[in-house]
Amino acid sequence: MTQGPKVLNRGVEGADFPLWKVKEALAQAEKRIASQLSQLNLIQARATSILGWISAEVLGTLALIGGNISKGLTSLEVLYWILFALSIIVPSAIATFYLCYVLPKMKWAFEGTDPTWLLVTVENNQSEYSTTQVMAEAKAKAVKSNDAILLDLVENLRLGWGWFLFTPIIAVVSILMIEVLSLIK
């Protein structure tokens, strides 16, 4: 028994295609926003982790400075320790400024559509197509807005991370300068 040629299933066509297209656009936008939210969480976790290291760095520096200043050092030696502390605290403060900027972003567009919008704003005589199209367009704008926020957050994370990594270098240079100054006196 011979079978005829198989007909290729081309999916939705004709008058039904525009509705399928806006539904698919909405679904893709929702997936994209979910992915962006995952990226946001990763960026904020990294910033929080670095802030923890900065806290330990600053607290250790303050303990070291406090312990040495309380030994009854000369005013010049106290000045050296204060300069050393500033060489750690100032870049740490700059890093903290950038990293704290990463955390409280609430201008974020989340997944889903506000049910109040659907229940109150959308009139009952509209079509599924027009309503879904408005939702898809709103989510497309949200994706662009989230992308801009992510780029800004990544830049601040990069700057904060850079200052965090630069802090030990500044501290070593300050120690060397303090040693040179102490040899001169």
Image (cartoon, grey):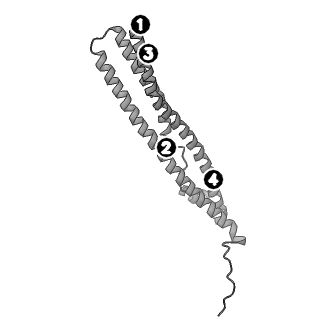
List x then y, in percent, for residue 37. 51, 50
Tag in front: 1 or 2? 1
Q: Residues within 10 Å of mark 3 (few under 14, many from 20)?
A: some
Dots 1, 2 in contact, CB < 8 A = no
Circle 2 sits on which residue? 43
- The residue that disc 1 covers is 184
Which quarter shows the N terminus? bottom right
Residue beneath the point at 60% across and 50% down = 143
Q: Dividing the picture into quarters, in which one does residue 118 lie?
A: bottom right
Query: In the image, which is nearer the foreground, mark 2 or mark 4?
Result: 2
Could you say which is closer to the camera, residue 76 or residue 59?
76
Tell me what residue is drawn at x 31 percent, y 15 percent: 69
Task: Give the mark, 2 or 3, whose residue is nearer the N terminus.
Answer: 2
The residue that label 4 is drawn on is 140
Res. 125 visible in picture: no
Q: Are marks 2 and 4 in contact (CB under 8 Å)?
A: no
Left or right: 160 with respect to 85? right
Q: Which residue is mark 3?
A: 177
Residue with the most extreme bottom position: 1
**Which amino acid, by three-letter code, is at mark 2?**
Ile
Q: Earlier in the sequence, mark 4 or mark 3?
A: 4
Do the residues under discs 1 and 3 have CB atoms within 8 angstroms? Answer: no
User: Circle 1 — which element?
Assistant: helix
The residue carrying pointer 4 sits among few (fewer than 14), some (14 to 19) or many (20 or more) residues within 10 Å by Cα, namely some
